[in-house]
Amino acid sequence: MFNIIKLNEKDNIGIAPMDIPKNVDLNIGIKSATSVPYGHKISIKKIKKGDFVIRYGQKIGITLVDIKEGEHVHSHNLIFSDFKRSYTNNYINKNFIKKKKDIFFKGFKRSNGSSGTRNYIGLISTVNCSATVVKKIADKVNLKLKETNFANIDGAVSLKHSSGCGMNNTSYGMNVFNRTIEGFKVHPNFAKVYVIGLGCECAQISLYNKDQLNRNVEYLNIQDEGGTNEIVNKVSSKIINQLEKINNVQRIDIPVSELTLALQCGGSDSYSGVTANPALGVASDMLVDHGGSSILSETTEIYGAEHLLFERSVNKNNIEKIKKQIDWWKDYLHKNNSTLDNNPSPGNKKGGLTTILEKSLGGVAKSGTVNLVDVLDYAEKLKIKGFNFMNGPGYDPVSVTGQVASGANIICFTTGRGSCFGFKPAPSIKIATNTNMFNKLEEDMDINAGTIMDNEKSLNEVGQEIFNKIISVASGEKSKSEINEYGDDEFNPWIIDPTL
């Protein structure tokens, strides 16, 4: 007999935890009418053409044809269909959670009071024209660090990108770009930052050097310094002379309330919403309970599940913000001949996900159950501790760039298909949704949430495991992505405006 997983009493489909052959007995008292691939959906009752398919007790799309019980349910017979969202929220008892007894991590305390989980030197290009320069500087500094023994320095990071010019100087896109640069410029995982431009670009360094009292940030233009070799030698020499001072910063006990966690998923599969994402939600709740913060993003991947966030909002303003963000996305995509339901990706579908509604329901599970205290625009600085939502696209590098710019100093990244992702200067913890993938890509995965499906651990046990890993990685333990030296090429500011 083959076991099928039913997630909610309202569901009219189940999930196959293994490849199911045709015409075999299932634990729900029926036979399989077709073969069903591992991780895919199977009908557990008859579903008429045009009826909603229900998973997690929520609508994930409508059927194209009549579906028999025991039949494979996927893209051939299930499509996206919008519906009216319903939620209840009277905002009573939607108060901030009182901080539990402090737990500490070993971090770097900065002079402005912020707390870092890493001690990097940052080289930020304001424009693609200075990308090669910041990389050359970082390479020279990292080569010097390999020859020395500065145990408290994690390295030099070049934050290079493809934007910064050919933009409307007063546009929304330019404002978003400027916020992103500002967020990284003052990020607590940097001990020292150099902001470097060419000199004639739209993103002039004069936009960023208004805080002359911040001695940890310096600003230079290639054109002012006499060319490539001049500025590379000048800045790399300055940094090398500062290494001993930067290395003198010691890790100290800091309450976990100073951690801000970026919640991410990529290469999702049908188990993402069953194992890794809800387990990460448990860990996120634990962090918020101790006074910390978490940031969920990817507006295009909460679509269809946004009403679940509405129910958790502490005020009506947050709900209106998210609604406006979704409306903006609909208009933005319409102008570009696309729609919000042009998702999931081919890999997501191969893993069993069929519609954006289904993907979003699983994705929102990363945020746990605590109250939604604030809604941010992309790269907007986090202002209120607790669970926040940040507007942004679903593309992982762009989304994470915004979260880190907002203040995230550590990342948890769930994946079902497998994802090789790291992001300097914030360490990234990878969480596998299933044991098969974990075993195949163990060198890239930090935690196996597939143990939930294997009945080896409970959801809360894996949530506690993730929470413990957050503390240990924040305290200096290298994550798998750091061991594999990911993170130098993932900085990717959101480009919204047309290139002029």
Image (cartoon, helix red, strand yellow):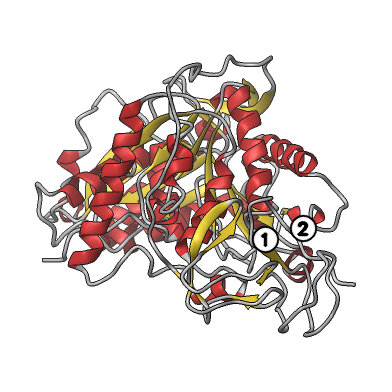
- Please state the horizontal and vertical placement of residue 450, each as a whole percent of the image: 77, 58
**The residue tagged with tag 2: helix, strand or loop?**
helix
Kind of residue at badge 1: Tyr
**The residue tagged with tag 1: helix, strand or loop?**
loop
Please state which of the two labelled residues, at mark 1 or mark 2, is closer to the viewer: 1
For residue 431, the mark is: none
Q: In this view, does 165 lie to the left or right of 377?
A: left
- Residue closer to the observer: 496 or 218: 496
Q: Is residue 6 visible?
A: yes
The residue identified by callout 2 is: 450
Q: Residue at x 58, y 70 (%)?
A: 47
Instruction: Quarter of the image for the N terminus: give it.
Output: bottom right
Q: Quadrant of residue 46?
A: bottom right
Q: In this view, does 187 lie to the left or right of 249?
A: left
- Please state the horizontal and vertical placement of residue 228, each as a whole percent of the image: 26, 61
Q: Residue at x 55, y 70 (%)?
A: 348
Q: Residue at x 31, y 55 (%)?
A: 494
Q: Are marks 1 and 2 in contact (CB under 8 Å)?
A: yes
Q: In which quarter of the image is residue 128?
A: bottom left
Q: Which residue is drawn at 40% across and 47% down?
A: 85
Cα separation, mark 1 vs mark 2, equals: 8 Å
Neighbour class for label 2 at 10 Å: few (<14), some, many (≥20)? many
Q: In which quarter of the image is residue 435?
A: bottom right
The residue identified by callout 1 is: 271
- Please state the horizontal and vertical placement of residue 197, each as a whole percent of the image: 22, 52
